[in-house]
Amino acid sequence: MKLLVLVTVSATALVTMASPSITVAAPAPGPAPVGPSAGPHRHSSVRTPLAAPHGPRAATGFRPFTTECSVSGGGPNLNLDCDDRVMANNEPHIAVDPADPKHLVASSNDFESPLPPDQFYTSFDGGRNWKTGNVSGEDVPYFGSDPSTSFDVRHKRVLHASMNFRNTANGRDDADVVVSPSSDGGRTWQAPVIVYGGQGNADSPTQVINDKPWIVTDNNPSSRWYGRTYVTWSRFLFLNDDYAESPIWMAFSDDGGRDWSSAKEISGSDRTCSFQETGAATECDQDQGSVPVVGPDGTLSVAFQNEQHEAAWEQGEQFDTQYLVVRSRDGGRTFSTPTSVIDLEDGDRDYPTNVNGDATLTDFQARLNSLGNIGVNPKTGELGLVFSDNRAGQHDVANPVTNTNVYLMTSTNGRDWRGPHRVASGPEDQWFPWLDVNPRTGKFGVLFHQEDSRRARYLTRLATGTPASGFSTTTVSTEASNSFDSVFRPAGAAAGECAKCTTFFGDYISLDYGSDGTAHMVWTDMRREVTVGGVSGHTENIFYARR
């Protein structure tokens, strides 16, 4: 699957109805998602020196946090979006305090305003009562995207990572990696720190977009690096608006997110990274979707997708991805060479495309990716990695038909991997898997979306088990989501019967286990019908459940 900058789709374009005569929301649509083109291209200039400083620094101005509302409920599903019942929220993440299993902080993309910050949701009673509001961020006109959160037990802080950028007529400008700290458990948020700065826009000779940042903290008291927080991201480089590379970068903090190390590239080189846009031979620098985890001994493992393994591309197609993992046993100072975990069936002839040319599912229009994540057993250090792809469907053809499934790979040492193991049965499409390990039972838990029997509808499900014992699956969402009838980013007349199908419902959902073995889950839900400007359709909300 050709790697894209997976930033939120035009956060200034809020709600556009399918009817060509009705547009709701004053802001004009921003630029389309950017990323590598569909075919190979090369540049005479391999590297361009960066003209601006990119190292850690305090934001020169910042937008303070706001607390907006509270939500309470004891039912099986709870809508966390009490601030605006119409505008969309998506890409939720949730983290449970390792020191207190009832302390939860979730986050999401929030489209309630023309320049939205990230949304936070904080609970101190196991998810029964929540405070919600906007996380602090860089000052207007910056806004947030791709949120993730980590608890730093040693420094008694909650750390929220995101991408902050400006959306301009010339594309995404100055796309920074930003961390906003909280010293009171997620009630309030302090001024953000810029971990690594972006540069330029589509009209600039050199543009740097820092996409999909992800954060994790070493909360193992016996670890030599106890209290060290890591952030990884994809550093997209464009030269004269042409894609050049997107290696994985990393920085760390030892003082609760106040100060950060110099950032560096960690994705390394391997013989499987044979295709090159601008990089040196075998350099693994066309990557996306990194997720770091820390094992009980302090070992840092980072999983990410890479599109350079030409041997995995079937005849007539390109850009099937592989999952790579790099590991550090010295607190992020050095990393192993990448280990190739598995090749995916997600190339440019493996999925149908939507009206925007993005990969999607059969009978859907929403942009899709094959990303999952890596997780670790907090007691044994066993690793699990999940993804979805179309290996069971009709792929490598002109008109693919999807039968996507969720698969699990496992490893006891990070080098040797077993799988793929399918985690759920059924002919329906499955996507957006997210994995964690139950610390009480040692079983894997995988949250994912699964197609409902009706067109462009889906359910949210949880699979639990191990490859040896098998998996049992339960439906978490109490109602189906309806992406067929959307008020947010509908496809339009070019999609025919799917004209009101959404083209974007985020890129991930999330699951985290507490130390008591309770699974806490958040997902993008489209059950709610709203009316905007006299036109009805379904919006996107963040729903929560626990098991």
Image: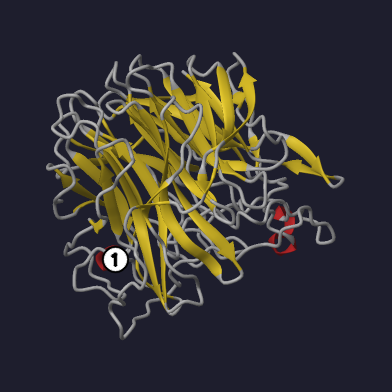
Identify the residue shown where x is 18% and y is 62%: 269
**Going by the image, does 267 lie left or right of 449?**
left
Viewer-side residue, 511 vs 321: 511
- Among the 4 quarters of the image, the one containing residue 210: bottom left
Q: Amino acid at mark 1?
A: Gln
Reply above or below: 132 against 430: above
Q: Nearer the viewer, residue 276 or 474?
A: 276
User: Horizontally, is 339 left or right of 137 in the view?
Assistant: left
Front-most of residues 240 and 69: 69
Image location of residue 457, percent across then percent down = 63, 40
Does residue 71 appear in the picture of this structure?
A: yes
Dot 1 crowding, Cα within 10 Å, few <14, some 14–19, many 20+ = many
Residue 361 location (% of width, % of height): 54, 52
Outermost residue, right side: 534
Question: If the image is split into quadrants, where does the N terminus sit?
Answer: bottom left
**In the rendered view, how is the structure colored?**
secondary structure
Residue 322 seen anywhere in this rendered image of the structure: no
Counting the numbered discs, the total is 1
Q: Quadrant of residue 411?
A: top left
Residue 424 location in percent, x, y?
42, 33
Q: Residue at x 14, y 25 (%)?
A: 222
Residue 506 left/right relative to 384: right
